[in-house]
Image: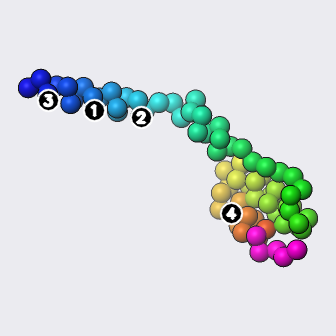
Amino acid sequence: MMLHKLLLFTLLIISLNSCKDPKNSPINAEQNKFFPGDYFENNSAGDLNDQGITFSQNGDYKKGNEFFFKSTRIRA
């Protein structure tokens, strides 16, 4: 019986730890990093990438994804 209580207590602790506030999570801080700049060989690709970043930051991920893919298709 004691083993069952210990198992339930352990599961409760794990569950409570997994419900932390995601705003304070260091993972979200890492996900929000982006690297705008002139590291593209083609200026048009860089512009499209920057537009993709802007759309994604505003929550329009589908439109942002389209611009990211367009930027990868441009040849130098």
* Residues rendered magenta in the picture: 72-76
Q: CA distance from mark 3 to mark 2?
A: 21 Å
Badge 2 vs badge 4, beta-carbon distance below 8 Å: no
Mark 3 or 2, closer to the camera? 3
Q: Nearer the viewer, residue 60 or 52?
A: 52
Residue 64: tell me if it is visible.
yes
Q: Name which residue type carries label 3.
A: His
Q: CA distance from mark 2 to mark 1?
A: 11 Å
- Indicate the secondary structure of the residue bearing disc 3: helix
Q: Position of residue 39 (x, y in %)?
A: 86, 58
Q: Is residue 34 left or right of residue 4?
A: right
Q: Name which residue type carries label 4.
A: Asn
Q: Name which residue type carries label 1.
A: Leu
Query: On the image, numbered disc 4 is attached to which residue?
Result: 65
Q: CA distance from mark 3 to mark 1?
A: 11 Å
In the picture, residue 5 is in which quadrant? top left
Q: CA distance from mark 4 to mark 1?
A: 39 Å
Q: Is residue 38 left or right of residue 62?
A: right
Q: Residues within 10 Å of mark 3 (few under 14, many from 20)?
A: few
Q: Which mark is residue 11?
A: 1
Q: Residues within 10 Å of mark 4 (few under 14, many from 20)?
A: some
Q: Residue at x 34, y 32 (%)?
A: 14
* In the image, residue 33 above or below residue 12: below
Mark 2 or 4, nearer chain start:
2
Q: Which mark is residue 18?
A: 2
Q: Residues within 10 Å of mark 2 (few under 14, many from 20)?
A: few
> What is the chief secondary structure element of the magenta stretch?
loop
- Indicate the secondary structure of the residue bearing disc 4: helix
Q: Which mark is residue 4?
A: 3
Q: Is residue 46 magenta?
A: no
